[in-house]
Structures are given as structure tokens and as C-alpha cells.
Amino acid sequence: MMMNKTFLNSLHIIMSLMLIGIVTSCDDGRIYEKDTAYKEGKTVQIRGVIHGLETWEDNSYYVAAAGFDNNSEYAVISKIINTTDEDGQVNITLSGIDENVNTVELCVLNRLRQRVATFAVHEMTETETSTMDIGELNVGRYHTIQSTLFDQSCIACHGGSGFAAAGLHLTEGNSYAAIVNVPSKKVEGKNIVTPGDKDNSVLHLLLNTDLSSTWRQNHSDMLNKERTSNLLRFIDDWIANGAKE
């Protein structure tokens, strides 16, 4: 009995010493950063004035400073911009930019960090630290639709030259009132945009089906579906979530 007790006491001492040694070897007084490698690389300082940030109400899309290579629509690195000062001033630093990144963009990303729309582009150089001056930009949700869809693909026929086909003015400042809850002149019984109902909105049908295949202009051919699938989904989500201005 005495031998067993002595043996157990000795074993307890040995185990305690071993535990102290393990703890001491692990805690050497230094703090190791989890993402040390991520912080290595180039740095871009983004500054300017942006408006419309408050229109991004959900977590499906967000405005960000993001770095891209030439081979993918997915951001290699990104930093969400969710606040500005009272005058809309933004001054943020995107650091840890990989050498494969060719451009840093002020853009809209979806939850998968895919590029949806771009507002400003900064070409990367060999310089380790550079500045991206974005000037003054409107990054509002509806303005994104205006600048990426209507301004690029629609206003040539709808108001840009003074003439508006079907009486539909899609120029900036006029488009929202011309489409939201406005009956279509071409499709009986449907609005051009019905908030909350994309499937019965003519805008959705024009861009995603052959509805206009017999019209003078086939609107489904206006956008390259492979290149702009994220934009089309973004427009549908805008309609489904209330089509706010």
C-alpha cells in the first residue's frame, strides 16, 4: 500500500513538471499574427467623396475597394466601405495587395466577392504605395443601374439624343419616374417595373426572355449574358426588394 502511494505521488509530480514544460515552451511571450502573410504586399490609399452609401441596406451587395487580377471577376482582396464622414469624404487604406493584382477598383461586390459594377479603376504599378483619387462619385443602388444599364445600353434610343422611343425617357433624373409603377405601352396589363414582383415587370422580361424578339429592337440581345449575368441578377434583386430610388 505504501509503495503504491509513493508511486502515485511520484507520478503526479512528474506529470505536473511535464505540463509546466509544455506551457512554458508554447508561451514564449510573443504574439503571433494570424494573417502575417496577408499583410505583406502593396498598399493603395483610396480617397475622395462618395454619395449614396446609405442605399445599400442589406448584406447581399456592398460597396468596396477591391483588387482584381486579369483572369477573374472575383476580388483577390477587398475592403468594405460602409461609412463616410458628414460630407461623404472617404479615406481608407487597402494593404496586403498581392503582386498578381492588376487593378484596384471602387466597385459593387456580391456576397461571393464577384464584381457587379465598377465606379473607378486604379491601375497597379511597381510602386509599393500609391494613391487612388476617386473624386466625387454617386454609388447609390439605383444610380448603379442607371450608369451600368440605362446610360450604356438604353439612352441612345430612349432620350439621350432628344428622341425617346415609345415615349420612354431613360436618361439620368428621368428614368425612375418613367419605369416604376408605370404601365408598359408595349405589354398590356404589366408595369415596366412593379416593386416586389420581378416576374411581372417588363424590364425583367425584356432583359431575360425573348419578349421583344419581334420588336424593332430585341432587348435581350442588348447585354452579353455571360459577361453581365451578375448585373442582371442585381437588377432582379433590386426589383424584388422594392425597387427603391
Image: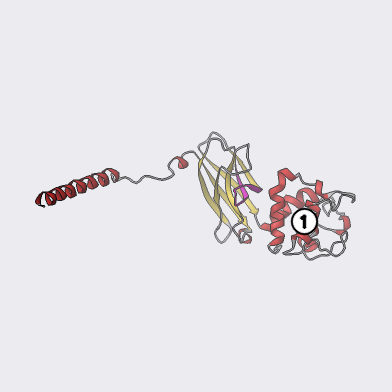
Question: Observer-nearest residue: 47 or 195?
Answer: 195
Vertical position of residue 193 compared to residue 123: above or below: below
Q: Is residue 116 magenta?
A: yes
* In the image: residue 103, left or right of residue 232: left
SS assignment for the magenta stretch, majority: strand
Percent across and percent down for residue 13 are 17, 48
Percent across and percent down for residue 116 are 66, 49
Q: Residue at x 26, y 44 (%)?
A: 22
Percent across and percent down for residue 110 are 62, 51
Q: Residue at x 13, y 52 (%)?
A: 5
The span shown in magenta is 104-117
Q: Residue at x 16, y 50 (%)?
A: 8
Mark 1: amino acid? His
Q: Residue at x 58, y 60 (%)?
A: 87
Counting the numbered discs, the total is 1
Query: Which part of the image, by quadrant, shows the C terminus?
Result: bottom right
Q: Which residue is mark 1?
A: 204
How many residues crowd mark 1 within 10 Å: few (<14), some (14–19), many (20+)? many
Q: Is residue 142 visible?
A: no
Question: Observer-nearest residue: 166 or 32?
Answer: 32
